[in-house]
Amino acid sequence: MTTVLVTGGNGQLAQCIKSISNDYPSLDFVFLGSNDLDISNTEEVQSHFTKNNFDYCINCAAYTAVDKAEEAPELAKKVNVIGVKNLAIACKNNNVILIHISTDFVFDGEAKTPYSEVDTTNPISVYGQTKRDGELEITSNLRQHFIIRTSWLYSEFAGNFVKTMLRLAKEKDELSVVDDQTGSPTYAKDLAKVILKIIKNQHNQYGIYHYSNQGEITWYDFAKEIFKQSKADINLYKTDSKRFKTLAKRPKNSVLDSTKIHTLLNLEPVKWQKSLEKCLKIINKQLNNVQH
Ligand SMILES: NC(=O)c1ccc[n+]([C@@H]2O[C@H](COP(=O)([O-])OP(=O)(O)OC[C@H]3O[C@@H](n4cnc5c(N)ncnc54)[C@H](OP(=O)(O)O)[C@@H]3O)[C@@H](O)[C@H]2O)c1
């Protein structure tokens, strides 16, 4: 049996992993939420790894409040840098392979083509900077690592853009969404499958990888497709980042080139519209169950 610790066990990605974990009978999962294991607590992390025998750690724990991080950089650093360093060192001392999730926000968004793993990082937000610093803690402390950068995660779990759009469609008659940030939405369940394939196949080509669903769109395009597929009755308008001000700056173009991980795992690209369809089906089922 291969034992897999999943940190940040109550978050969106961790819940996606949990939802498919039965399909991997050779893997024995331990999901720990922030109350069970605070990754920023060095002693707690060390002692947990020493007392237990993990083969892999999937780090889904992160400070993900992008705008709040601008006002609370120390909090973001505590989780995304110190916490990640704690995990990297504990993994090294206990011969555990770390699979860590990072973000498209490590880039400044000025590129005209999709970002590859060797492109220069240049975060433009506190969140992006802490996620980049977390990556560096791993690469400088631990050889046995996979860092997977992903973008625009959504799923049937936790709060995310898709669920927000569905809620707003019920509450409002019209909505404006930014049309000057381009990226690729990623169904967190697709990412979960990618992570578990790395473990199942026991890959050892360690390093940084990019993974997102296929397609380059703006948030406006994403909202439009969500409303189209869910037959929502709402008027949608385009706006831009100048009019829709946020505390944190976001990259203009954060499309990731996922070729490297597709080659490693022999994956077919997954079109973002297809994955959205799958996710919306599940969300609708959940809503029907609640209503009946
Ligand atoms: N969401 C996106 O659009 C997106 C895009 C690109 C990359 N990513 C990356 O993908 C990963 C997963 O994101 P997600 O959407 O699943 O995030 P999420 O839903 O916000 O989950 C993060 C989890 O981390 C936990 N956490 C926070 N501080 C912790 C600590 N000190 N110790 C242990 N757990 C802690 C949180 O628990 P509490 O709620 O109890 O604090 C939460 O359950 C993150 O690394 C994120 O940076 C996300």
Image: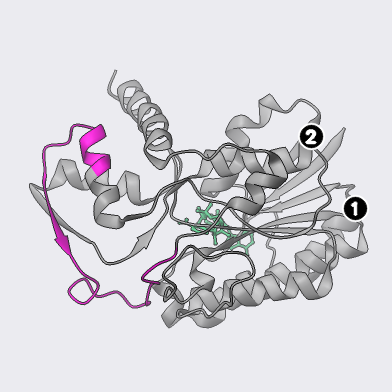
Magenta stretch, overall SS: loop
Residue drawn 30% across the image and 49% down it: 222
Q: Nearer the viewer, residue 259 or 1?
A: 259
Asked if ligand 1 lies within 8 A of label 1, the reply is: no
Give residue 126's mark: none
Image coordinates of residue 278 in percent, x first then y, are 41, 30
Residue drawn 62% across the image and 48% down it: 9
Q: Quadrant of the C terminus?
A: top left
User: With respect to residue 164, does 87 lie above or below?
Assistant: below
Residue drawn 14% across the image and 54% down it: 175
Drawn side of residue 80 relative to residue 176, left or right: right
Q: Which residues are magenta?
A: 225-254
Q: Nearer the viewer, residue 142 or 46?
A: 142
| Three-letter amino acid code at the position of disc 1 | Lys
Q: Is residue 31 visible?
A: no
Please name the residue that numbered disc 2 is placed on. Answer: 28
Q: Nearer the viewer, residue 199 or 8?
A: 199
SS at badge 1 = helix
In 3D space, how far apart are the residues under numbered discs 1 and 2 (Cα atoms)? Answer: 16 Å
Please name the residue that numbered disc 1 is placed on. Answer: 51
